[in-house]
Image (tube, coloured by chain):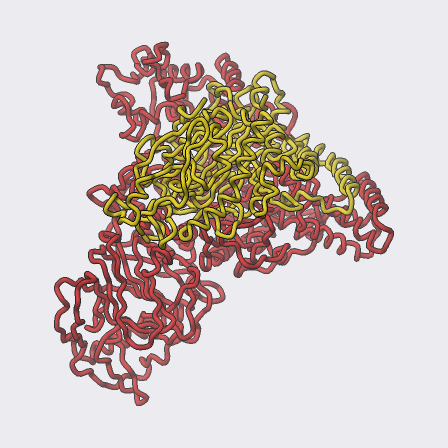
Chain colours: A yellow, B red
Amino acid sequence: MRAASQNAKTQISRREMLYRCRQGFGGLALLSMFGGLACGEDKHLPSGSPISDGSHHLPKAKSVIFLYMDGGISQVDSFDPKPRLYAERGENPYKKFKVDNTQFADIGSLMPSLWEFQQHGESGMWVSELFPHIATCVDDIAMVRSMVSNFPEHTNANYFLHTGIGIQGRPSMGAWVQYGLGSENENLPAYVVLDSGLIPPGGLDNFTSGFLPASYQASVFRTGDIPLANIQAQEASKQHQQQKLLAMQTLDRKIMQQSGGNDAIASAISNYKLAANMQVSVPEVADLRGESLLTRNLYGMLDEDEHTRNYGAQCLLARRLVERGVRFIELTCPKVKADRWDQHSDLKNGHERNAHAVDQPIAGLLKDLKWRGLLDETLVVFAGEFGRTPFSQAGDGRDHNPSAFSIWMAGAGIKGGTVYGQTDEYGYRVVDKPTTIHDLHATMLHLLGIDHERLTYRFGGRDIRLTDVHGHVLQEILS
Amino acid sequence: MKGSTRWLILLGVLILAAVFFSAFGERSSSSNKNVSFNFQIRPVLAQNCFSCHGPDPESREANLRLDTETGAKALLANGQAAIVEGDPDNSSLISRIHSKDPESVMPPPESKKSLTEAEKELLERWIAEGAQWEEFWAFQPPKADQHPDLSTADLIDVEINAELDQRGLQAAPPATADQKLRRISYLLTGLPPTVAEREAYLLDTSQTAYATWIDHYLASPRFGERWARHWMDLMRYADTQGHEFDYEIEGAWQYRDYLIRAFNQDLPYDQFVREHLAGDLLHKPRLHPQTQSNESVKGTIYMALGEGKHSPVSIKQEEADRIDNTIDVTTKSFLGLTVACARCHDHKFDPIPTADYYRLYGLFETARIHRYSEANWLALQKDRQQMDSLHQFLQAQSPTISPQSNAWPEEAIVWADFRDGEDWNWVADGPAFSGGNTAKRPIISPSGNATLPRVGSMRSDTYGKGVAGALRSPNFLLQKDAISFRIRGEKASLRLIIDNFQLIQFPIYGQLEQRIDRPQFQTITIDNLNDYQGHKAYLEIIPAQSDRHRLHTASEAWVEIAWAVEHESALVFNPPKVFAYEKPPNFPIPKHLHPDTLAWSSSASPSYFKGVSSGPAVYSPIFIRGQVDQPSDSSLRHGNLSALGGQMFAGEGDHRLNFAEAILHPDNPLAARVMVNRLWQHTFGRGLVATPDNFGLQGKLPSHPELLDALAVRFREGGWSIKQMLREFMLSEAFQRASVPRSGTKSKDPNNQYLSHFSIRRLEAEAIRDGILATAGCLDTMMYGPNVAIHLTAFMQGRGRPTRSGPLDGMGRRSVYQGMRRNFLPPFLQAFDLPVPFTAFGKRNVSNVPAQSLSLMNDPFVQEQASYWAERVLQLAESDSQRIERLYQEAFSRSAKQTEIQTGLQFVQQQCDLYPQDIAAEQKAWADYTHTLFNLKEFIYLL
């Protein structure tokens, strides 16, 4: 089914092993346990290899689609209804609970949800009218209402959500997954970020390979004619480039001979073949013209709002990448008029614009994956970096709140219709089953067949994990 | 030998462990020698036992520690000892590791660690042989040089060859002259040799030709540019602070220039270390060769190169993170120790207790970020002396100051009231304010008569307006909710610096920085300070204003402050009247003391940079489990790491210079070992210690410990000369070997740890890009100065994106001069493993990915350079074959083979045929050819 488990059964030659490792396609960490050799000294892997003492478990998910809700969705306006806020509208939060310092230090009065909540599906899960389409998928969704983060600032919270550490430069979860599992498709990058318009605060370092080799960093796809940097051949014709590649092959023989068939050089040479393949396969996957009207409609690509159309296209592209075995796909937020989900003011318009842009496309994605039988092996995660305060800021906005927020997961190995954890009556703090970013990561890795405690990389004298020294798998939301 | 075969089988099973523990493994295979504690036993204990039986008391189980001899051999509660010398049967460690009972076996199953049979056997053998303990190798003083009579190059060969012999490895034959030239050129300067250099080198048939050319490249200005970049990896160099808006770090590039000059002039490494930690504290700093500004202080810029968070909700946490990063970078880079691991608990593996961390924490907390101007240091010194003489003269002339005062209200805390003629322990940094309190500074009439002002104050315009500098208060713990100031000036600011927080701005902190733009005195109040009660703060007065955290000193900037008082905002008070003199004295002063003769005032420099300067001593408590809101009761004095002696630094105040001297002390074996290992790594491709930033227990053991020691001693005793070391490394035979191993060698030493041949390696990102520019003939060798703006592609998006993109070719300047914006790093360099600048990177990754091929094939920069290159070569009156020969010499530093010329000619013809047959066709076909050459592996690999 997946590269790693296949390799478990078949003996792979050292040459092939080296070849795979050097491509960056091989899941280095897991491959290494199956009788191969280390990929050369450039990979300073831990000595007592973290995964050399046994195999990780059978995976549920082959791929992850991470829908990043940049800026922080308000939980009390979306997935975590708080009737008490209506009753105490306009009251002073300091009289109700201990108020933490916030990003803007502008603490207003208690503000109830601006949107009505209703129960949906067989599970009866509460969803506000912000997300009418997602609401139709609740029976496939496990809602975690008890998320907490460590940081009230965007950049740190973004780094934390993406890398498990709130500072710049650590490997992103997509990089870890690729490091652990590799890809199933050598003609496409294993870790793709679909830039839907907004690169989150903290920049591309949210998607970095950090101290892992550069092989594991994300490839950022943009909408438009050229989906990926340097993917378009510059030559006058295909044949011009073809002849160059042929000449390279001939002329590179000299160095192969001079170097005594050096492995690194051999794989650098074969990289050209892969690169040439990618020149074909990347534009091919990004070309949505062959998709039916029905499908386009399902994803909201016929909507009158261009942001919905664009995000719909990104969701559809995500499905196409999953179909081709891409391991980890993250979608960033579309650039709607009101910025991302970060509504310090004008919550009404801001959240509505953002919700409208993503709601139908996401629901379309879930349904499409399900119809195609892909949802069983694809984990879809919907998450922001933190939530928002139940009290107002600037009269009609909400400030950052890392002490409680909601995220959801759907698909492979997820028990649909579950609601996990609980916040207080104001939705300000978690009171039951506090769930950390590390828990989220541990669960994602678990579904991918990776024990988060054993996926490690030696850096700066420590065997470092995505989950640092924390993390528990959220067993209760697993099917 | 039986043991060794078994070990080799285990190697196969252990896979990764095999490669990374190879020093350990192979040593055991070498002979029937006694088991080595340092090389065979300690690594096993460290890896498998220390997390519960190591230096950290909080995680220690059963009161047993195996990281010290006393601990390991002590009687335990059950009456047994873990290790009984010479008696494995009675050592509970042995019975526990062999136990079949999951409750009793060590390491326990839940630790997910386990010992191999070979490791168990080694432990038994070691105990049977007497369980001899050794101090960890890295903390032992280096062993005496066994061959003091040999040159360093010869010494290297003796040691390397001995090791090869012992392992039955055969050295490869010597490399070709071309290969050697390409190696020394790239490794010393980061650029390929020019055709002219190659010709001269090949013509020189003397014995010393090779050495001459090593010296040639060592003397090249390009040398500093390459070696500065190596060092910048360690110092997480960047021009911006990352996070949400990626604010600029003013003058960061001055640090890069400082490094280039330092490496080019072969600044002794000990001085280099001193200047990094305490360049501002040196009494006799080095001066910049042109501007005569203080060069030494630029070393401290490294402390300002970290990340800065936009609007942190907890500034105490932000300070802690910043200092943590400084400790991490400093100790990894200069000591090869991971001290930052002791932030939350004692180090799990190395003898680094948390207290050590917080001793250094206070030491770095004491330093204040300061913006320096590149002022002429000599002129400043002269002026200061003159100012001192004037003060002395005045002291003798004028009556003692006796302030007339009525009192401030008791509830107020007076930070300063300069009107009384005192300086209140505020400190002036830079030329502004350095004239001291105006009460002691005369107003001089044209007739040469001096009058002292009746009322004192601190003014920035001693040397005139637009002069840089800062006036800073001592540290205070904030107690009230407001601070008021009496102040005036133009284009100036006052800043309340709480917890050393610099990125003051909206939304939370905006009011902590006030612009001063009124030439009349006014009272300004900063209030709402409740949240900061108990926090450390100081006040900073600067004749400059900030724009997106970049300070601008306008030519008309000046500022004057009379007093600063902390109080409750509710307190209503009238400031008391304070007069320095009841009747200001009036007297003539000698002409030579006239302030008009000050030398500096006209030499103001527009260039500024951020480094650190001294503040009053701050002693930090331990933050329990690293939590800033859980300080221990008592604070720790500044002191050296316990592993290096642990002495406390004498006296009160700033101890960065003491720490630098402790690092450099002859009793500290690490400083020289770590640096000499870095030089070795950059020369040979791999360090004698393969983990250059970690010489601790989790690091790799040295492949040639005796050699490392001898080199370290020679480095120190030879005056810490980097160039001298590199010269000797390159003169060794080991360096000059061919890159193809002799048959059979590769299987015995797959990573070429023992240097039987030259390790083929891919060039670094910068060397690839610079090599392209140089080969194309487009390299602009202009040195120094502000960075070239980063070229922005459509794929580089996000907040803080510069409004304008830089040129595609980076103006043809070397990569070291290209902008390094944390949030917008150059993608071409990143594809080839440029590290993300967040901590010390002594060793880069070397990945091999299609993105690299895609860059070389499709990046417009590469295409453009190929086309310039073709254009240049086509202009020469040469035959096509001669052109190809030339292209080969330029790109690969060698002649083209006949077959290669044929392939080239054929290729050009074929491409040409594909283009429309106009005059551009030939040029395009040649550009296709040069582009193909850039894409050959020979271009990016060093053989």
Numbered disc total: 0
Viewer-nearest residue: B904 or A315: A315
Asked if B475 appears above or below B432 in the picture, the reply is: above
**Looking at the picture, how far across and down is residue A207, in whole percent?**
51, 41
Q: Residue at x 45, y 69 (%)?
A: B605
Residue A279 lies in what quarter of the image? top right
Q: If the image is split into quadrants, where does the C terminus of chain B sit?
A: top right
**Looking at the picture, how far across and down is residue B589, in whole percent?**
27, 84
- Left or right placement of residue B279 versus residue A191 in this view: left
Q: In the rendered image, is residue B796 in sight?
A: yes
Q: Residue at x 66, y 52 (%)?
A: B774
Viewer-nearest residue: B521 or B301: B521
**Looking at the picture, how far across and down is residue B91, in whole percent?**
30, 14
**Looking at the picture, how far across and down is residue A196, in whole percent?**
56, 44
- Left or right placement of residue B712 versus residue B866 in this view: left
- Left or right placement of residue B759 versus residue A47 in this view: right
Q: In the rendered image, is residue B754 in sight?
A: no
Which residue, as the protein is rendered here, is positioned at the far bottom?
Answer: B447
